[in-house]
Amino acid sequence: MMPWLKSFFRTRWIASVPPVIAAIFFLAFSGKLPPLRDALNLIEAADIRQHLDFLASDALMGRDTPSPHLKKAARYIADRFQEYGLAPVQGSYFQKFRVSRVRLGKENHLTVIRKGEETPYRLKKDFMPLDLTGSKAVEGELVFVGYGITAPEYQYDDYAGVDVSGKIVVILRHEPREKDPESPFAGRRLSPYGQIKTKIQNAIDHGAIGALIVSDPLNHRSIRPRGFPWPSLYPNLPNDAIPLTLALTEKNKIPVVGIGKKVVRQLFGSVDSLRQWQKRIDATMNPLSRPLAGIRVRLQTQTDRQDEETQNVVGWIEGRDRRLKQEILVLGAHYDHVGVLKNAAAGMDSIYNGADDNASGTSLLLSLASAYGRFPTKPRRSVLFIAFAGEEKGLFGSRAYVEQPLFPLEQTVAMLNFDMVGRNAPDTVLVGGVTHSPDLIRINERENRFVGLELEYSLEPYYTRSDQYNFGRHRIPYLFYSGGLHEDYHQVTDHAYKINEYKIAMIARLAFRVSWTIANTEERFRFVENR
């Protein structure tokens, strides 16, 4: 430091100024920015351990959505955001949204109309509403859409060549070549495309107004009407064993029911006919989708809702660049878990502490908030920190955000998500985004040369299972960081003492370098639909 500047800093008035202000004053005179290592040094394993021990403590009772204990966790996160210098968004550190406890109503009907003749079917015996069903009555032509899958990366689309807009679709469960280890999807493991929620969202995206779900007969002999076990239909079940849904999506839902043998026989002639159709799809990997000529269906499912409020936790750093600060980088992690084990025996551990899932990712997010908030230099782009609620219930918090964003999605340049980052090999991190976000992967690899983690790209099968999915659905490039699954996943044994806070700190330093690069470049990043 120049002699005159040393003398200046020894003056009485500047010595009394807080260190951060003094540092900024020094920058104004020196023209130099503080080195990035100063920000990285703000990421400390001891702080991560403190966050972990609180969030995964018995006092928070597993942070279920919604619950008073989740609110306590939310308050803790909001207090840290404020302490670290993050600003509230639109005047609050909380983004409120509503969830719905759903019960089956009384009006549930399925009628098949063929050549003018109506055949009504019986609830529970012939058809069963799924937990994803909407509260609507519809009528329309019927279209068979095979497995109901659209997977561009596998050059497979059951909706190719058919128009289902305003129609009701028939969908097989699971996916092609389910028992074939060489299946182009995920071998014998069910890929995200095989999940019912993915199939139903795909049907809605294609304009369908209702869906009939049938067990695929080639691999499953029992063709019964599989749906949700509603307590009103099964008196031996607890009265509170009901689905929890995201309230704002209720208006977009369609009636969805599982159908049994009787309905299948009327639609396809026999179960064996449907089996042969499925066999041809599996053999050729070509869709066999088609309208079921001359058949209409009248379908109604009714649900009754009880809404409750919960919250994401949000805070942001406004960018310093007059133009680029309008663009947003999102850093996120879910802070909820699954609550407590009901009807546990006396003395039995009944709390799902969720230390790795996902107190670890939340603690990493807080360490990044500390680094960004306390570092005197702000990024050119703005950075939004979100702790999501309701991930364990169906990615509710991230869905609520993208449906009602606090900043325009078209100005959101990327999203980094942290989920289960504290276990397994201490020097290894799993990274998702290879399929859709090659530009971000390239940045991650470059920045990792300064950190030295082993990078494994094995998270693509889990794309739909954490909060980056809802951003990807809106074509926002993302990276997904995880330490991977282990024997304590969703067990009461997922305790804080098993977490490696030093591993989390290493991943946090990589994530800071990556996010800092994203937030300070003018580059816009690609989202790739099909690679």
Image (cartoon, rainbow, N blue to C red):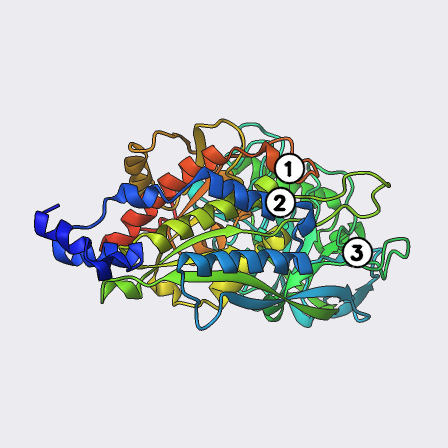
* Amino acid, disc 1: His
Question: Visible in this render: residue 237?
Answer: yes
* Amino acid, disc 3: Ala
Query: Which residue matches tag 1?
Result: 495
Which residue is rendered at x = 41% and y = 52% of the image? 369
What distance separates the C-alpha of mark 3 from that of mark 1?
27 Å
Residue 118 appears left or right of 501: right
Among all residues in the image, which is located at the extreme right?
A: 236
Q: Nearer the viewer, residue 85 or 387?
A: 85
Task: Give percent across and percent down for residue 167.
Answer: 60, 66
Task: Give percent across and percent down for residue 402.
Answer: 47, 63
Query: Which residue matches tag 2?
Result: 56
**Disc number for residue 241:** 3
Q: Nearer the viewer, residue 312 or 145?
A: 312
Residue neighbourhood size for the residue with mark 3, other residues' Cα within 10 Å, grouped as few (<14), some (14–19), many (≥20): few
Callout 1–callout 2 Cβ contact below 8 Å: yes
Give the position of the N terminus as an image quadrant: top left
Callout 3–callout 1 Cβ contact below 8 Å: no
Q: Nearer the viewer, residue 293 or 202?
A: 202
Which residue is rendered at x = 56% and y = 68% of the image? 96
Mark with earlier residue (3, 1) = 3
Callout 3–callout 2 Cβ contact below 8 Å: no
Residue neighbourhood size for the residue with mark 1, other residues' Cα within 10 Å, grouped as few (<14), some (14–19), many (≥20): many
Give the position of the C terminus as an image quadrant: top left
Task: Give percent across and percent down for residue 459.
Answer: 48, 38
What distance separates the C-alpha of mark 1 from that of mark 2?
7 Å
Depicted 63 relative to depicted 348: above or below: below
Which structural element holds mark 2?
Answer: loop
